Image (cartoon, rainbow, N blue to C red):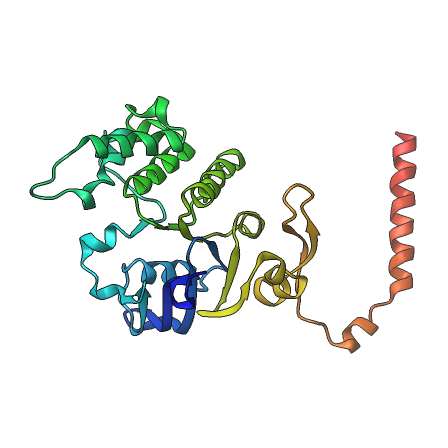
Amino acid sequence: MRPRSQLFMIDIKHLSLAYDSVTIIEQLSATIERGQVTALVGPNGCGKSTLLKGVARLLRPKNGAILLDGNAIHKIPTKQLAKQLGILPQGPSAPEGLTVYELVAQGRYPHQGFLQQWSAEDEHVCREAIALTNMVQYADRPLDTLSGGQRQRAWIAMSLAQATPILLLDEPTTFLDIGYQLEVMEIIEKLNSERHMTILLVLHDLNQAARYSDRMIVLKEGAIYTDGTPHEVLTADLLADVFNVHANILIDPNSGAPICVPFGTVQAKLPEASTAEIPVEPLLNLHTNRTSQSFAKHLVS
């Protein structure tokens, strides 16, 4: 059994993140465990993508620190960090005409050096990444000729070619139809189960997060609202408090994961006096009369 310190690949300590003078994340602390899939979820504007950018070193902390295997992430040399941590941001773009293979080959950049140019190993890693993401038949196709789902798989293949133990993904299924969403999530599941990758991803779909993650971290207004397994996190009370919806929680008979089925938004409670003043019986009579009149006209016509 590993010592407790080795269970955590990423340790976030009292982290504050801001855009100029606007603070989004305030004094947040969390740990990302080695070999797990962790989903960041929460309503729009709660700080999910901002937190991911902080972990990816795309946004410098206002306060606090992020440790990667005990080392401050902002002190790790860029090329060394790129061998440990890969990121797929929202809506990535590539030069026009770039093929899938050429994109995937970019993932090998951290492994290149002045005395170490393109090798047979680089070729093998790229081909393997393309095969793992089911993109072999599209390897020579320009990215801009592919569908959204195919492009997303190509970008994931590039991240795989980096051969990092950690992969960060920001809303990898956004704007994809349901079939492509499932393909992407199944690839992520396979990377974790077969390659033992530590995966931290932002998801909007709570049911996907519950189905494919080991752990869910729920953010609200820049802070952690709760953190735990999908069964611990996905409750009717949480959905009402964080997402402002009423929902039933069911169990997926195939995966055993919880499923939320929303049936209405949480509305502010009306004063008792207002509800008491509504004359229920006249409304029922009015509805009955209108229904009878409508039915009569239908019979005549």
Name the residue located 45 percent from the left edge and 43 percent from the top edge: 188
Residue 60 is situated, as x and y percent measured from the top left of the image, at: 26, 66
Name the residue located 63 percent from the left edge and 58 percent from the top edge: 231
Residue 266 is drawn in which quadrant?
Answer: bottom right
Left or right: residue 48 compared with residue 85: right
**Furthest-front residue in this view:** 1
Name the residue located 56 percent from the left edge and 53 percent from the top edge: 206
Decide if residue 112 is in sight here. yes
Decide if residue 98 is in sight here. no
Which residue is at the front of the view, 118 or 174? 118
Residue 133 is situated, as x and y percent measured from the top left of the image, at: 40, 33
**Furthest-left residue in this view:** 114
Q: Quadrant of the N terminus?
A: bottom left
Left or right: residue 207 compared with residue 143: right
Left or right: residue 92 compared with residue 8: left
Which residue is at the front of the view, 169 or 193? 193
- How many numbered markers are drawn? 0
Which residue is at the front of the view, 267 or 65? 65
Residue 291 is drawn in which quadrant?
Answer: top right
* Position of 142 relative to 45 (above/below): above
* Position of 206 relative to 255 (above/below): below
Residue 154 is situated, as x and y percent measured from the top left of the image, at: 34, 35
* Position of 137 relative to 122 (above/below): above
Q: Quadrant of the C terminus?
A: top right
Residue 7 is situated, as x and y percent measured from the top left of the image, at: 42, 62
